[in-house]
Amino acid sequence: MTRPYRTDITVEEFVRRHGTPYDPATDKYHREPFARETKVGKNSAIYNAHSYHTKVPPEGIVPYLLHYTSPGELVLDPFCGTGMTGVAAMLCAQPPHGIEAPPGSRLGARAAILNDLSPAACHIAYNYTHPVDVRALKAEFEKIMGSLQGEFDRLYGTTCDGCGGPATIQYTIWSDVFECFRCGGKIVLWDAAVNPEKGEVKDQFDCPHCGITAKKTKHKLVDNVPVVTNYECAGACRPKRREHRIVESESQLLGQVDAEPIPWWHPTDPFGSDREMWRGGHRDAGIVSVSDFWTRRNLRALAALWDQIQRAPEDVRPALLWTHTAFSTTVSRLRKLAFDYRRAGSVAGGPTRGTLYVSSLVREVAIPPALRRAFNDVLDYYGGLGSLHADVVVGNGSADSLSVGAESVDYIFTDPPFGSNIFYADCSLLWEAWLQDFTDRGREAVWNKSLKPEGGGKTLDDYAGIMAGAFREMYRVLKPGRWTSVVFSNSDDGVWQAIRDGATDAGFSLENTVALDKTQRSFKQIKGEKGEEDVVGTDIVMNLRKRSRASVAVSTVPDLEDRVLAILRERLADLNTRPGAASEAQRTTSELYSHVLRVLMEAGLSNRGLTMPFIEDLCATVFKKVAGCWHLASDEIRYEAGLSFEVVDERSAIDFLRSKLSVRSMSFGELVPEWRAATLKVGHALGKDLHQVLEENFWHEADTNRWRIPTTDERARMGDERTVRLRRRLRRVIDGEAASAPDLLELMVFAWTDLADARAAVTVFGRLDLTALPGDDAKKARRLYQVARARAAEEEQEEAPDGRLL
């Protein structure tokens, strides 16, 4: 059952007040599926008021609510997170600038039921959707700041080096200390590995005692110490912001704070290996309870603040608690030190969202300025709402057992957990420890990777079962003929199939899918776009219609590879008709995966076996990858940065070669010295050697052994899929991939007759076991080898004395 959050009204009573009974005799509802792709940013006052592990900006939800519902109708979000669906229900009365209302839609607030298993999510959602009197809130905040001023002055006061007067600490840099594995001496990481002027942190560094060079993982972590204080002078010094090495008075104060008991309540709940996000590094860093995620100084200040908030009037207390949770993680040890490479020597960095990672270099941000900034963000949010209001109720409970009557909800918009992308209960642990209200992890919809079933972890089947229950509940409470929009993003085909199976088994019909691009990427999405993790960059919205319970089977794809290749080929050809940066952004493996997934789903086809590595491997066999973007093999790639041919990436490298070959055809040996000079700065970062760039983009004249710009017909032949496949296979075999004798012979013939690549033919022959071939094939291989070896020797004499590049 759903527990009402901070309200006397139950969810059942809320439905009775704001819902309308479904009457099939009079119901005239009809909507086509929402079909417009949406792109929204994350820098609004709404988004900045309180952080969360992931959220859909409400500006991206408003068009869905306007399209599928009318003013006053009842909207449900069973996985509400921060309550952005509730915020969108308010914004429907006055959509933000730039949000286009769908044709035929009517403006006006919608009523919303927000539900989440996480008490932290309910806390955030409640405050997002229940505005307060801004003047009363500001007055109480200033009162609290005044009462804490003495404590803050003691904890964060220091002395200015310039004038000798008082100053206020803005942040302190803490560094791990290691014990050298060789000599046992102490190594302060900041001193051994960091160059703050250049903003560099060495991966390997020297022990100051014995001189051994090694990574930090070779040494034993033994301590964590403050090394640098950044402060603001209270006097007339300019600049006011300065920093110095930690001084004796500051060290003494920290020692006193460590020794003193904290006189106010603060969370001390344990943190250990029963948590998915626990790592051995936490143990090594001395983190055994929630309180250990803060320095003792910041923990003391947060406890004092929490105590004062508990004394505040009831009408503003929830918003003040919201302010506390809004910034408490940003002043924790999760806030890593990072250098802003745009400005040498300056520091940046915050907690890595979606993790509990504690860095070896931590920026302990002082509570007073961080608290002030967080409160200003809260004020900006509440002030920006003006007179906007919607009837919203927040409930805490599992999505598979809602306290909502059957066929009472007009529309559902939800963003459920993504399998194993984010472990919400662990990510919310620090907030929930302060609230002393914790997620029921036994009912959390996750697929554990580190935590095994015997230790309380969940399998993919467990995750699928929980999601199936949630979809059945959504189907039960939704009125017939109405819609559910599900935002989802996961590169694992098993997770996708679990979502699809759960929706179709519940009775929903998938009508279409559209993209929702949240513009800014999460940490994992950025790594996914770089190819470091299989994470999708653009979310997909599945528009599901409630229908009868007649079973709808999802057809399997008989030849997944051929079907996907056809989809990819069509997609890349279509993108060629729409040049520009927006089109180029759709060519990454992540975006192509999302596109193929949508096409299969809309066709009612199974996506089993479809993963990002599958897309990457399939593209590599047929297409060419330029600067992380896939193109048809026949595409002509041009650099768009003007007439300069400085080689900075693969595109400019292609243009450099085009500039040379547009004058005259050239042999490989003639191109080598100019190529070396042009690529001197970019070096191996280019990712391809001269031969590979030439093969993929230019034409080789076999009779003259020279390269030139291809004609239109020749470019079409370069895109012949047999040629592309064999060329890719040839390169992999040359790099050491195993192959049978018949395959090697085929590649040897291809290298010589199709590519006129004598050295490739010779290399393949060196891998060939002639005894594994029939007699005639063995003779053919020997004859070909003799001709190719002679030609290869001639080519070597044409090149620069020190041989072929790379």
Image (cartoon, rainbow, N blue to C red):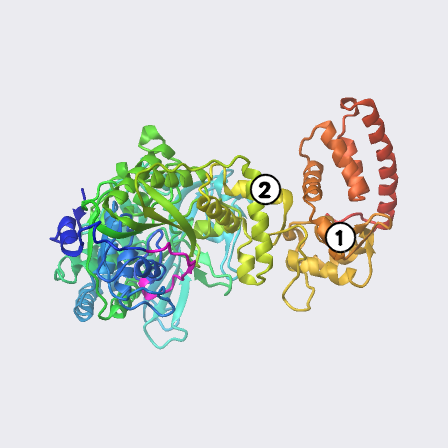
State whether residue 535 appears in this view.
no
Q: Is residue 415 magenta?
A: no
Quarter of the figure that contains the N terminus: top left
Q: What whole-number distance in Å separates the C-alpha atoms at marks 1 and 2?
A: 24 Å
Q: Residues within 10 Å of mark 2 (few under 14, many from 20)?
A: some
Comparing marks 1 and 2, which lies closer to the viewer? 1
SS state under label 2: helix
Q: Residue 463 at x, y = what percent?
A: 34, 37
Q: Is residue 539 left or right of residue 624?
A: left
Identity of the amino acid at label 1?
Answer: Glu
Q: Nearer the viewer, residue 804 or 633?
A: 633
SS class, disc 1:
helix
Note whether 712 is above or below 142 in the view shown: above
Residue placed most toward the observer, 121 or 285 = 121
Q: Position of residue 25 (x, y in %)?
A: 21, 51
Residue 15 locus on image (x, y percent): 16, 52
- Residue tagged by mark 2? 618
N-terminal of the two: label 1 or label 2?
Answer: 2
> Identity of the amino acid at label 2?
Leu
Comparing 11 with 189, the one in front is: 11
What stretch of residues is rendered in magenta?
31-46
Crowding around mark 1 (Cα neighbors within 10 Å: few <14, some 14 to 19, many 20+) is few
Residue at the front extreme of this rendering? 25
Q: Is residue 490 above or below residue 573?
A: above
Query: Does residue 631 appear left or right of residue 782 in this picture?
Result: left
Instruction: Report the number of numbered marks.
Output: 2
Residue 714's disc is 1
